[in-house]
Structures are given as C-alpha cells and as structure tokens.
Amino acid sequence: MKIFHKSTATLAVILLSSSMIAAQDLSKYRSYSLGASLGGISKQVDATPNDVSVIHQNPALIQELTWWPVTSGEPIRRAEAVEQVKFSFFNHKLYKIVATYEDTATKGFTADDMVRAISATYGIARRPAADLGAPAQLTYSSADVQLAIWENSEYSVVLSHSPLSDAFQLTLESKQLNGEAEAAIVEAVAQETEDAPGKETARVKKEADDLAAVRQANLKSFRP
C-alpha cells in the first residue's frame, strides 16, 4: 500500500511538472507576441513610421523596428535591464524579437545566472554542449555563443552571449514565419546581386546625364 501511495505521489509530481512546462508561452517576450502586426507593436512602443526600416521589398516585405526603452538623455532606470529590442516583420507580421540586455544591469552575471533568470519565464532550458574546438582568440567575426534554448514545435527562444561586446541577448522566433522570412531574404539578396551591375550602370549614366545638363545650363548663363 505504501509503495502504491509513493508511486501515485511521484506520478502526480511528474504530471504537475509536465503541465507547468507545457504552460510556458514561448511566443511572448514581456507583452510582445510573435505574429503580432507591425501597427500593433508600433503602438505598444510608441513608434512612428519613420522608426521602421525597410530591409527588403521583394519577394516579401521585410521590415525592422528598433526600440530603446531608455532614450538618450533620459536618466537610466535601474529597473529596466533591456538596452534595446529589435522587432523583425515579415509582410507586417512579427517573426523575430531580439532583446539586448544593458551591460551594467547584468554586470558580474554568469551564464548560469542568466539561464536561471530566463527559465523562470520559459521553463526548463536545453543547454548546448560546449564547443571545445572553438578558437581561444576572439575576432570581429566571432559568433555569439548560445547558452540555452527553450523551444517547442512552433517557437524557439535562445539565450546567447557576445564574446566581443560582453552583452547577453534573447532571441525569440516563430519557426514558420522565420523560415518564410529567411527564404525571402535569400531570394531578395540573390536578386539584388543579379541586378547590381545594371543598377550601377544606370547610376553612372544618370550622373553623367545630370552633369551634362548642368554643363549646358552653365554654358548658357556663364559670363567671363
């Protein structure tokens, strides 16, 4: 009988833990939700159309909005640990959020400190194996180091650390939208590369035509 009760209690703990893990919402960072519209996010962060950058227009519209919780000249609020948040949109839908944490707010933090803090929101993390073959000498091309990953079939949350800037970053992605956005970006870059020679030729010709027009106007008005 005691063994039965003990097994039942263990099963209850496992089920409770599983339900808590399943309840973690990996689609949200604070009050910002992946899949939200550009207009909705702009209202949340009080952004204007001039704050939005167009990265690519074809074959899909890729836009970015960078939000600085503390603007320049504003006293630093110690309660705000985020330096900036970059929102990326695919055809006006939010597909990626990248939050960069302010270095003074995380000064002295170890990787375990950050993983523990983020896990309070997103649940149990998966820790990537350390890359023992990584070069010891850092260069400007050194990639950010992944510290922990939280994911399900639809979303992923990755905590990373820059060995150069010493900043921690948290990246949230919609797997479906991010996949579509990356495919569109690859196609856009390929098209831009193909069109580049023609655009350069057109630019040079336009500059020559403009200069010729100015020359003719100056010849008519010039008096020595």
Image: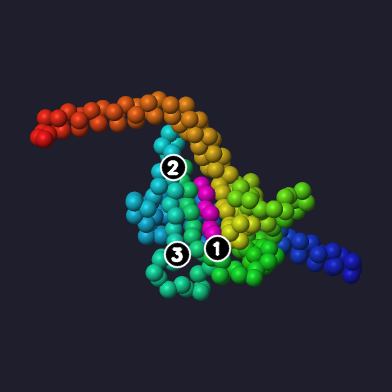
In the rendered structure, which disc, 1 or 2, sits on the residue that comes first in sequence?
2
| Disc 3 crowd, CA 10 A, few/some/many (<14, 14-19, 20+) | some
Can you identify the residue that label 2 sits on?
55
Cβ atoms at labels 3 and 1 below 8 Å apart: no
Residue lying farthest to the front in this orientation: 224
Q: Position of residue 137 (x, y in %)?
A: 69, 53
Q: Position of residue 46 (x, y in %)?
A: 37, 60
40 or 214: nearer the viewer: 214
Q: Is residue 206 magenta?
A: no
Choose top left, top right, bottom left or bottom right for residue 195. top left
| Disc 2 crowd, CA 10 A, few/some/many (<14, 14-19, 20+) | some
Q: Which mark is residue 145?
A: none
Residue 6: in sight, yes or no?
yes
In the rendered structure, which disc, 3 or 1, sits on the residue that comes first in sequence?
3
Q: Which mark is residue 101?
A: 1
Specify the amino acid type for callout 2.
Answer: Ile
4 or 177: nearer the viewer: 177
Q: Position of residue 116 (x, y in %)?
A: 67, 66
Residue 128: in sight, yes or no?
no
What segment carries the magenta color? 92-101
Can you identify the residue that label 3 sits on?
69
For mark 3, give the secondary structure.
loop
Specify the amino acid type for callout 3.
Answer: Pro
Q: Tell me what residue is drawn at x 44 percent, y 66 percent.
A: 70
Q: Tell me what residue is drawn at x 55 percent, y 43 percent.
A: 178
Q: How many angstroms separate mark 3 from mark 1 (CA)?
A: 11 Å
Q: Is residue 119 above or below residue 50?
A: below
